[in-house]
Structure formats: structure tokens, C-alpha cells
């Protein structure tokens, strides 16, 4: 409760100081990777790409053919990340990477060595699409793995040396789990996307809560696939939600189907701070869709898949890390006030977005 009053107070101070500007609530990250919006940008979107994309190319490490759909976080003044590395045998695994600037990355040679709580090796058969979120003093890695079918795996670390697997939060089939970066009303919150055993042709985002990261319940529907064509097949959580004075800013992926397969775009929504199953605003246009060669051409063409952001509360700068064409990692940039204004201007919410999501 003290924490909550503290936050209200911080938001109030921020609003007084910056009037109606939208503020990120969180730590400053003055070295957030950044490039200003290009003057000759051909779209009217509030998100623009890094001119030197992709930042991670093919064959980035020994035995790893491609790195994509990966998550990064500030750490000890620099950056650290968990990377989906597609090994040369085709099986995806998670590798640790470090970077001084958030753009150039060095990867550890070996997969992250997960152990169980007794200290025994406890490696998943495969692991993909990791997210990395700090809650209080612990870093959590959340990914998709086999649990008699595609499901969610979780591990905790405090030093990035030992990584302890904790109980799988949900039954199969499930993917795209994303932890919130702080407890809400004293509970951990996790988004997930229940699915099936294949390349699921459906899927809505739900939120579940837990007092201890082991037992999960109070499941609520957050939002379904949209009526808009770019997200009319399925959606899935992307980067960990960013706390702002307007609500939780969520970058997620939306999928449409074509005669040549799925197309993955990046969308944006703002969830209520205290009851995140309620969608306050949801952008009816994509924020970024495959357009560049590294998004359109690769192992799976036409995929932009956000898994993390780095953001600076002082300046409102947000850097989005996204997988491109299941082959590369790209960066895209936005400012919190610009992207929130755009989402609000283009917001279309349905009844299932705005209800608390229990039936
Ligand atoms: C999804 C996941 C993602 C991948 C996407 C496009 O089902 O497997 O890892 O980026 O398909 O292939």
C-alpha cells in the first residue's frame, strides 16, 4: 500500500511538473540506445526504425544460425539480454548476451544453464521467444518450451550466473507470456496467450495473477484478436508493459493471414494501471509492419515480433527490440507522448476490451 501511495504521489508531482505530458514511471536510463526520427520519413507513424538495422545478423555465434525474438534490459550501467538462438541443428535455445550500448552484442557460447531449485541441471528440450523482466530484486526469464506441448517456462536469476527454473505457470498449450515489471495490488501479473499444439490460427491475450510466482489464478481476458485486418487472426503479448501516467503501455503482435502465410505486425494498447484486464485505448492501425528487406525476407518472411523495450523516464524515449523474419533483431524508436497520443487518436475498443474479462 505504501508503494501504491508513493506511486500516486510521484504521478501527481510529474503531472504538476510536466502538465499534461505523458510520463514513463520508472528509472531513468540515460544511455538508452537512440536515434532521432528521420526527417524524410515516408509514414505518419509514431515509430521509426534504426537506420543500421538489423543489429544482429545471421550466424551471430558458433553453432547459432539466427538470433531473433529476444529481450534485453539495463544492467549495471550497460545492457544484458536473453536471446532466442536457432542452433544449427534447428532447435531454438536461449543464450545470454551483453552489450555496452544496447546495439552491439556479445553472446555467451553456451546455452543458459538452467537448474532446478535443488541445483540439478534442468534444461528444457527447446526454448524460444524469451522475455526478461525485473520485478523487485529478481530478474525473470519467461519463454515458450515443451511441457508435453508448447507451454510457458520461467526461471529466476539475481546475478545472471545461476538461473533457477521455477514451476511452469500454466498448463499447455500456451505461448507469449509476459510478466509485468512490478506487482499490482501486491500480486505478480503475467500476460499469456492460450493456444493449441500447432501454428495456432487463433488467440487472445489473458492476464493471470500470483502471490508467489508459483500458483497462478484470477485469470482475466485482456483483449481478443481485432476487427482490423492486420490483427484478425491472433494476437500475443510482446514487450513487458511500460508503466506510464496514462496506463500500462503494451506493444504486442497482431497477425493476419494471407495466401502466402501469416504476417506479424506490431500494435499498441494502453491498459488500466490497477486493473490491467481493462483496455483503455487500443490502436486500430499497426505501429510497425514488415516493410524492410530484413523483415520481409528470411527464415519466415513478413514477421515483426516485439519482445522488449528499453525506456528512459527522464526523456520519454522508448527503444523497441523486435525479431524480424525469424532471422534478425531490429530496433525501432518512439517517444512516450507521441506514441500514446497516436494510440489515443486511433483508439477503437470493443466491449471485450473494456470489460474486466471474467465470465
Ligand atoms: C510464432 C512463434 C514466433 C515466430 C512466429 C512467426 O508462432 O513461433 O516465434 O516468430 O510464429 O514464425
Image: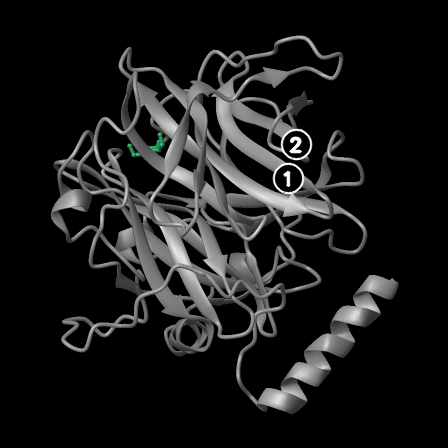
Viewer-closest of 61 and 330:
61
In the drawing, what numbered circle is on residue 157?
2
Q: Name the quadrant containing residue 295.
A: top left
State which image quarter holds ligand 1: top left
Name the residue at 41% across, 33% down. Answer: 83
- Please state the horizontal and vertical placement of residue 61, each as a whole percent of the image: 30, 25
Mark 1: secondary structure: strand
Total number of numbered discs in the rendering: 2
- Choose top left, top right, bottom left or bottom right for residue 161: top right
Residue under the image location 49 percent in, 75 percent down: 315
Residue 63, above or below 14: above
The residue tagged 1 is 139
Crowdedness near tag 1: few (<14), some (14–19) or many (≥20) residues, C-alpha within 10 Å: some
| Label 2: element kind | strand
Q: Are marks 1 and 2 in contact (CB under 8 Å)?
A: yes
Residue 200 horizontal side relative to residue 22, left or right: left
Amino acid at each position: 500500500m505504501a508503494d501504491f501511495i508513493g506511486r500516486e504521489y510521484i504521478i501527481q508531482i510529474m503531472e504538476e511538473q510536466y502538465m499534461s505530458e505523458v510520463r514513463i514511471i520508472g528509472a531513468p536510463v540515460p544511455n538508452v540506445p537512440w536515434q532521432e526520427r528521420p526527417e524524410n520519413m515516408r509514414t505518419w507513424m509514431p515509430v521509426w526504425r534504426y537506420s543500421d538495422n538489423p543489429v544482429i545478423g545471421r550466424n551471430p555465434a558458433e553453432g547459432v544460425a539466427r538470433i531473433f525474438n529476444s529481450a534485453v534490459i539495463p544492467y549495471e550501467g550497460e545492457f544484458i539480454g536473453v536471446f532466442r538462438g536457432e542452433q544449427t541443428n534447428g532447435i531454438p535455445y536461449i543464450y545470454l548476451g551483453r552489450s555496452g550500448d544496447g546495439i552491439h552484442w556479445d553472446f555467451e557460447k553456451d546455452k543458459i544453464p538452467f537448474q532446478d531449485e535443488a541445483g540439478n541441471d534442468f534444461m528444457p528440450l527447446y526454448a524460444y521467444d524469451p522475455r526478461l523482466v525485473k520485478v523487485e530484486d529478481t530478474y525473470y526469464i519467461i519463454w515458450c518450451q515443451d511441457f508435453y506441448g508448447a507451454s510457458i517456462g520461467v526461471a529466476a536469476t539475481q546475478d545472471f550466473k545461476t538461473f533457477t527454473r521455477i514451476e511452469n505457470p500454466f498448463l499447455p498449450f500456451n505461448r507469449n507470456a509476459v510478466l509485468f515489471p512490478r506487482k499490482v495490488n501486491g500480486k505478480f501479473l503475467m500476460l499469456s496467450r492460450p493456444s493449441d499444439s500447432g501454428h495456432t490460427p487463433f488467440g487472445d491475450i489473458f492476464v493471470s495473477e500470483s502471490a508467489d510466482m508459483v500458483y497462478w489464478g484470477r485469470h482475466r481476458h485482456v483483449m481478443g484478436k481485432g476487427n482490423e485486418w492486420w490483427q484478425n487472426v491472433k494476437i500475443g503479448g510482446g514487450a513487458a508493459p511500460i508503466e506510464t501516467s496514462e496506463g500500462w503501455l503494451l506493444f504486442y503482435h497482431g497477425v493476419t493471414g494471407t495466401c502466402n502465410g501469416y504476417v506479424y505486425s506490431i500494435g499498441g494498447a494502453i491498459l488500466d494501471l490497477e486493473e490491467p484486464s481493462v483496455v483503455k485505448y487500443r490502436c486500430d492501425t499497426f505501429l510497425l509492419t514488415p516493410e524492410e528487406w530484413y523483415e520481409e525476407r528470411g527464415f519466415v518472411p513478413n514477421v515483426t515480433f516485439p519482445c522488449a523495450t528499453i525506456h528512459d523516464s527522464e526523456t520519454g524515449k522508448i527503444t523497441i527490440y523486435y525479431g524480424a523474419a525469424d532471422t534478425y533483431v531490429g530496433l525501432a524508436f518512439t517517444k512516450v507522448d507521441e506514441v500514446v497520443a497516436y494510440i489515443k487518436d486511433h483508439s477503437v475498443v470493443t466491449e471485450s476490451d473494456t470489460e474486466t474479462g471474467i465470465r
